[in-house]
Image (cartoon, rainbow, N blue to C red):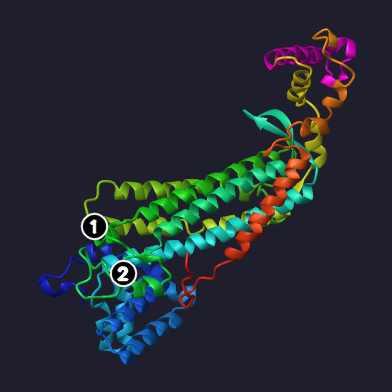
Amino acid sequence: MKMWSGRFREPLDENFDQWQRSISFDWRLLPQELAASKAHASALAAAGIVSASELTTLRSGLDAIARKFRSPERAAEIAGHPAAEDIHHFVELALTAEIGTLALKLHTGRSRNEQIATDLRLYVRDEIQKNIAALTNWAAALLAKARAASDQVMPSYTHLQRAEPVLVAHWLQAYVQMLLRDITRLEDCSSRLNFCPLGSGAVAGATLKLDRSIAARELAFTAPTANSMDSTSDRDFVLEYLHALTLVGLHASRFAEEITLFATAEFAFVELPEAFSTGSSAMPQKKNPDLTELVRAKVGRIHGAATAVAMQLKGLPLAYNKDMQETQEPCFAVTGTSQMIALLAGFTASLAFRSDRMSAAANTGYLNAMAAATYLVHKGVPFRTAHEKIGNAVRFALEKQVELDGLTLDELEQFGSEFGPDFYHAVTLDATLDCHDVIGGTARAQVRDALAIAELQVTALRAKYPVVASHPEVAHAGA
């Protein structure tokens, strides 16, 4: 029997009945549904709707369901339940089988509209914790690699053309900064969603005088939501979460693309770890960057999920509409993001740099031209003029097939009387690096200071966000 069949005279069309069910995917919300149901039972007891002994029985029954479906394999069995319409219906049926008709009291004073709104908030909050933990570990791996790189150099690029030399540690820390921003976005999303819809009813609020703070407190929410219509129809947090993950995917994809390029024979800056690479079934010599190629592609799935939810929510009138059922699967579709980030952490730790190739590339191609112009600026030459003089010198050096420091002083002086013997020191690799001596620059001292600061930030984050376990009996930690 349906949870709502009282006013209906005809059964549902069988094909429509199967098509409109959500149990095939929302079974994943079992831990959240059980936790929210226990919290609602506590609110019912406080309101005098269930007795203390009934509360104990209800909560014990819900715990028994959690134990029974603790393993992922057992939980996945729920998807094929022949009678359950959704996860809420499944829990009611399972609880009735566990403790009898007392289970039917649990739905007093609540609606499935508020249940799914609560379950999804709990689910997204849990997933945010996992993703932040994974991002923090990847940031730690990048910083460890930066620390090990010490003063190794590489070319930086603009327009995919060599630009200036930078420390390898500086390049790696650029990705750390991206991940730290990703973490703050996820934290912001978590803080905004952390309000409890339970007690909102179907649309106008619970019809019983429930103390909504009881459920909010038990589920580690900041407070109850402020408006019942908004509570049951809000999926902003789903879209915000998916947009935040899209940026995570974009940053992972940028790293993956650079590594894919740097692993080619044309660059040969990195040696791909064999544990994260595959071969060719046809060409015996191949070592393919499958991990980075797949990472590069995954952002499409994540952004696609965000786009789908945006289109599902567009133009919906208040309050709950069945359209919102479609916002769940995009959430589940990106569950693998934390695993992808965890793989990137292991991949980064195993990555080997070809420092000889990187250094050779950083020492050729006039990457010290900006430092040469800065040398003239210190001699009192306006930068635009200095730029022109060094550009002329580079053209002359290209014709001679030498670097700037391969020009004689006499040759340099034809471009300006400001050139002196100290020019050659000003365009050494170390001087070229260290002339960028500003916060955020690639000067060696600045990079060391930045590394120390980032390490402190990541250490604090790792303490705050340990790896999160996930099964029905795990309590939902606060955001």
Q: Which residue is mark 1?
A: 321
Q: Is 14 displayed left or right of 161 in the figure?
A: left
Q: Is residue 351 visible?
A: no
Of residues 46 and 363, which is closer to you in this image? Answer: 46
Find residue 117 and report its horizontal and vertical position in percent. 33, 63
In the displayed structure, would residue 75 be above or below residue 387? Answer: below
Q: Secondary structure at mark 2?
A: loop
In the displayed structure, would residue 294 be above or below residue 404? Answer: below
Residue type for callout 1: Asn
Residue type for callout 2: Leu
Q: Which residue is mark 2?
A: 198
Q: Using the rendered view, name the quadrant where residue 119 is placed.
A: bottom left
**Alpha-carbon neighbours of circle 2 within 10 Å: few (<14), some, or many (≥20)?**
many
The answer to if 10 sits in the magenta stretch is no
Q: Which residues are magenta?
A: 383-412
Of residues 131 and 410, which is closer to you in this image? Answer: 410
Query: Label for residue 130?
Result: none
Find residue 253 and report its horizontal and vertical position in percent. 57, 44
Find residue 433 and report its horizontal and vertical position in percent. 77, 33
**Alpha-carbon neighbours of circle 1 within 10 Å: few (<14), some, or many (≥20)?**
few
Q: Is 91 displayed left or right of 166 in the figure?
A: left
Q: Is 409 displayed left or right of 393 in the figure?
A: right
Q: How many marks?
A: 2
For image coordinates 25% across by 72% down, the residue present is 110
